[in-house]
Amino acid sequence: MSIKNLNQTVMAGDIVVSDFGAYQHWSLVSDKICENGQPMLISATARNRTVKEESWEVVTQGKPTYPIKVTYDRPIVAALDLARSQIDMWKYSLTTNNCEHFVKWAVGLEVSSKQVVAGVIGATLGAAIVKAYAENPTTIKMLGGSLALGSLLVVGARAIEKNSDA
């Protein structure tokens, strides 16, 4: 089954990201459809502190959402079954069990988060740059450098949108 949404066709098993500005939220498209005709999404969220299968609107909160260019070898039914096995079981953590970790785990990819890695590297480099080059490197200045460069690298770690004809 395929669903047309926001000028993109999404199918069960697709990975979609919702653009929340400072970060992207990763979800797995379900094989279930909401009463409004939109697909359900399975994802781990800070909002729930676990995994839930929820309506498109609840998960995306109206933010731009699109399928990303990711391939995996696990059968879709197996990926959805694994994802559902974690509903109310997964313990959400921004750094070790976030939405990107969860989706990659469910589809059989290496469990990692480009956004977390980019944020940590950026924060570390930002503080180091301030410490090395500031005339008076205070803790506040180093925190500012961490936040600025960390945020910039998280934004740069965005997932690539899948072509609508792919």
Image (tube, rainbow, N blue to C red):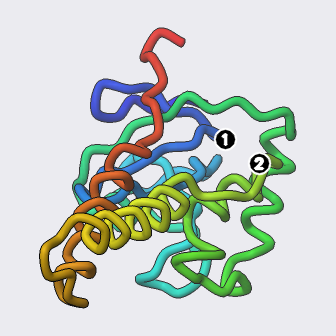
Q: Quadrant of the C terminus?
A: top right
Q: Of the numbered discs in the image, which one, if any, rests on residue 40?
A: none
> Dot 1 corresponds to which residue?
13
Q: Position of residue 165 (x, y in %)?
A: 47, 9
Q: How many marks?
A: 2
Q: For this rendering, which residue is in front, 31 or 78?
A: 78
Q: Position of residue 151 (x, y in %)?
A: 29, 61
Q: Residue furthest top?
A: 165
> Dot 2 corresponds to which residue?
107
The image quarter containing residue 133 is: bottom left
Q: Residue furthest left?
A: 135
The image quarter containing residue 164 is: top left
Give the left or right position of residue 1, taking residue 75 as reference. Answer: left
Q: Quadrant of the N terminus?
A: top right
Three-letter residue code for mark 2: Val
> At x 17% / y 70%, what residue is drawn?
134
| Label 2 CA crowd tier, 10 Å (few <14, some 14–19, many 20+) | many
> At x 57% / y 47%, what residue is drawn?
29
Relative to 29, say whether 4 is above or below.
above
Give the left or right position of residue 50, taking residue 36 as reference. Answer: right
Give the left or right position of residue 58, taking residue 118 as reference. Answer: left
Three-letter residue code for mark 1: Gly
**Disc nearest the viewer among 1 and 2:** 2
Relative to 147, say whether 100 is above or below.
above
Tell me the SS state at disc 2: helix
